[in-house]
Image: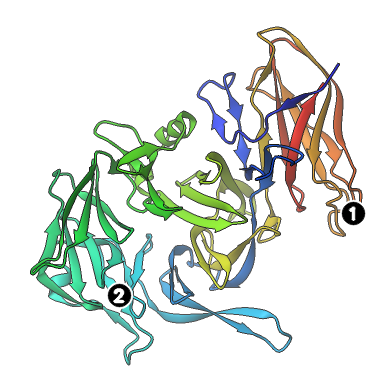
Amino acid sequence: MPKVNLPIANGFYVSDSLPISNQECVNWYANIPQTPGALSLESLYGCPGISQALTTGAVNQVNRGAHVKNSKPYFVNGTSLYRVDKSVDGDGLTVFTSVLLGTIPGSGRVSMADNGTQLMVLVPGGNGYIIDESSGTPFVQITAPGFTANGAPQLVEFVDSFFVCNTDTKKYIKSASNDGTSWSALEFGSAESDPDPIASIHVHNNKLYLAGTETIEEHQNIGAGGFPFQRTGFFIDKGVYAPFSMISTNNTFMWIGGGTNESPAIWSLAGNTAQKISTTAIDSALQDFTEEEIQQAFAYSYAQNGAYFVGFSLPTRTFEYNAITGRWNERKSQIINSKGLTETLRWRANSIVTAYNKVFCGDSQDGRIGTVEVDTYSEYDSEIIRTISIQPLSDLGNAISVTELEATFESGVGDLVTVDPQIRMSTSEDGRSFSDELSVSLGKVGEYNKRCIWTKLGRFPRMAVFKFVMSDKVKPVFIKLEAR
């Protein structure tokens, strides 16, 4: 009897009804080779790991945000603002060091923007700070009366020589040209197409988007006298539910939101309209969170190895979208809690920036600053649990007997630490409960033709679902899956 190919790269789609689909895709992402001659038309790569670059401390140093100015990354860890510098030691090795710049009170996420000289750090609803290492006073708090004259500033962006902030009074304000310390009470505007509050602001293609809870309105600097920003007439009837979820990537921007009386979903700007990019499975997962939890969500983006990742992290889950393949996956981390027990939580990265030709991340657990590396197969030495379960295999409701299952992985990936790495497989006949795991070897060092085969898997009354789990710290590449 011939073998059949089974799809493995559909991405995350866990349905409300698990027999319909229980397609987990955790810490894997879909890869589509850009050549017709590849061994498989679709495959899976393991999500990259994290290596420690430096640390600012283990106690009260959770990351609150990051930004890059003049190619140098800045991190707010705990109540401290740090700049990360790069140097080369006497052995020719790259060394990253942190430079303490000042104190940023609070514990929530911060908003950051720069004009090439000044970096502005804003505590939403609180204080704003200007960092200018070229001046005699490199760290100052914004004290201009005009800064708070139109309400408490919430988020900051920079566009056309101005720092721009939305406030909690349905207004937005701007600084003096290239001076974040100078603000006038008369320099403000408002979103006029709808009376909904301005939840967030975002700059894309040198245009300013005022994002309300129900609508998004485009403004642009027209260079006229008085307040220079005016409506362009462009309007989207979708609002933003999570202020920190607006993110630019691959010539568009995305956000968590919806229209009037709509449940949360993930949207993308597509020409002159909003296009929903989240699947119904992602939408269902978002509905499991409260309004307050949705508001805590934040987004990140980075490009690596030809993939453009856009992630949306909520308090307990992280969903990631690959803008190249259009497929979703989930990210999870193994965390050792205060009791010494291992917990599985959302991806531990609290912010992502690219500098020094590396992808840096702040941490949700402590003051470590890491680099996201494709050839690192752990997160700060903690294992990465990679899970993939495929779509149901069925034959019009008829019983199926599976006599052989072969998963093709990149083999021979063992090393001196993990001598004989394993892949674990389990089966389900209902999409809900799975059998005990059966392990096979991925191949020791040099065993490049090692085959991962399971035989005599038995009879399935209506359908079969296969799940694969990998946790060894070796290169993860899942090429194809075949069944007899």
Dot 2 falls on a residue whose secondary structure is: strand
Residue at the farthest top position: 398
Left or right, residue 218 beside residue 280: left
| Residue type at numbered disc 2 | Tyr
Residue hosting label 1:
445
| Residue 385 in picture, x, y percent from top left | 68, 45
**In the picture, residue 290 is in which quadrant?**
top left
Q: Which of the pair 354/307 is nearer the observer?
A: 307
How many C-alpha atoms fall within 10 Å of the one at disc 2: few (<14), some, or many (≥20)? many
Which residue is located at x 52 percent, y 66 percent? Answer: 354
In this view, 131 is above or below 323: below
Between marks 2 and 1 in the image, the one whose residue lies nearer the viewer:
1
| Residue type at numbered disc 1 | Val
- Please indicate, yes or no, whether residue 105 appears anywhere in the rendered image: no
In this view, 425 is above or below 153: above
Residue hosting label 2:
129
| Residue 155 in picture, x, y percent from top left | 29, 61
Left or right, residue 411 beside residue 13: right
Dot 1 falls on a residue whose secondary structure is: loop
In this view, 443 is above or below 80: above
Residue at the farthest front position: 36
> In the rendered structure, which disc, 2 or 1, sits on the residue that comes first in sequence?
2
Which residue is located at x 47 percent, y 77 percent? Answer: 83
Q: Quadrant of the C terminus?
A: top right
